[in-house]
Amino acid sequence: MAQYDCGYGAWIPGPVLDDPGLRPRSLILYSKIARRANRVGFCYATNATLIEDMTAVDDDGSLRVLSERTIQSMLAELQERGHIRTDSGPLPPDKTGTVRTGRRIYIGRSLAAIPDAPQGGEENFTPEKICTPGVKKTSPPIKGIKEINKNNNPHTPKTPGFVWDLIHGFVPADDAEYLEALEGLVVNREALKKPILTTQAMNKILNRLRKVNNRATEIAMLNKAVELNWLTVYPLKADELPGRFDSNPPEGYSREAGDTDGI
């Protein structure tokens, strides 16, 4: 049995844990926010910090990273369900004494004064250094995205920004499920050391999806490509086709809504 390092866990209150309207990953994101909020009831983590918190490394070494749009969707879900609230206000001064203004995320407590203790402009409040009795410091450290990027071969190419721009222009803005499926293919190709590096390569994949013109089928094609480690998508067999409305497309959905110029 694995032994885990002492440290701090995540506490999820009953109303949040039992909310059937929350997606599992949103529940996990809440636990990350609650851990950062700690004793003061709020934190001021940026989207980039939350993306790092939600980054995971699979057993095979592949990296699972969420997009900022997905994080925003999960934050909106938590706020709409009444589990968090946000505002914009002063943050603790940084090392130069400069006081910045930014987003603060609350987990149910009233707005509290910024603690007098210096925080150095960090994005979370340092938790108390306590250990669970009987737990040994024998587990390997958790790999975060910063450590992974530090150890990555700098010559290994990554998916460029213009490819992600094509993806975000292709998928309707409110379709988080489709975006997640398409991002899964791109991230999986990076794990296979076969990243998409050109507009032409990305457009070939998008055009194959566009020709299908069925949201549920397109998502199923993407999921199958990831499952089988394919570099692109292929038509499904007749017995693999989902029902036309199995994936509950957003109201007013059409493939044309995701079209972008030049694709």
Image (cartoon, rainbow, N blue to C red):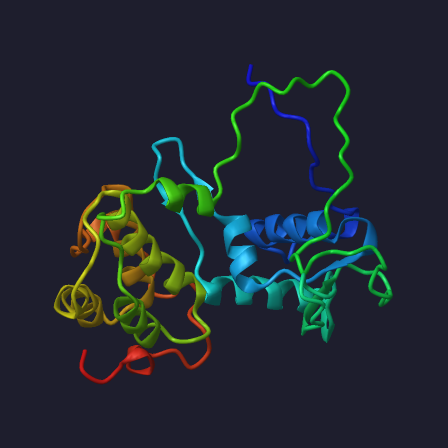
User: Is 259 situated above or below 22?
Assistant: below
| Quadrant in which the N terminus is drawn | top right
Estimate the x, y position of residue 256 in percent, counting from the top left: 28, 82
The answer to which of 102 and 227 lies nearer the viewer is 102
In the rendered image, which quarter contains the C terminus? bottom left
Q: Can residue 246 be seen in the rendering of this structure? A: no
Residue 130 placed where, x, y %?
77, 31
* Residue drawn at 32 percent across, 78 percent down: 258
Q: How many marks?
A: 0
The residue depicted at 84 percent of the width and 68 percent of the height is: 111
Task: Estimate the x, y position of residue 2 in percent, counting from the top left.
Answer: 55, 18
Among the 4 quarters of the image, the one containing residue 81: bottom right
Q: In the picture provided, is 39 more to the left or to the right than 67?
A: right
Left or right? Give the position of 85 relative to 113: left
On screen, 40 above or below 253? above
Name the residue at the bottom extreme.
Answer: 261
Q: Is residue 93 left or right of residue 141?
A: right
Q: Position of residue 238 (x, y in %)?
A: 19, 53
Location of residue 56 with respect to 163 vertically, above or below: above
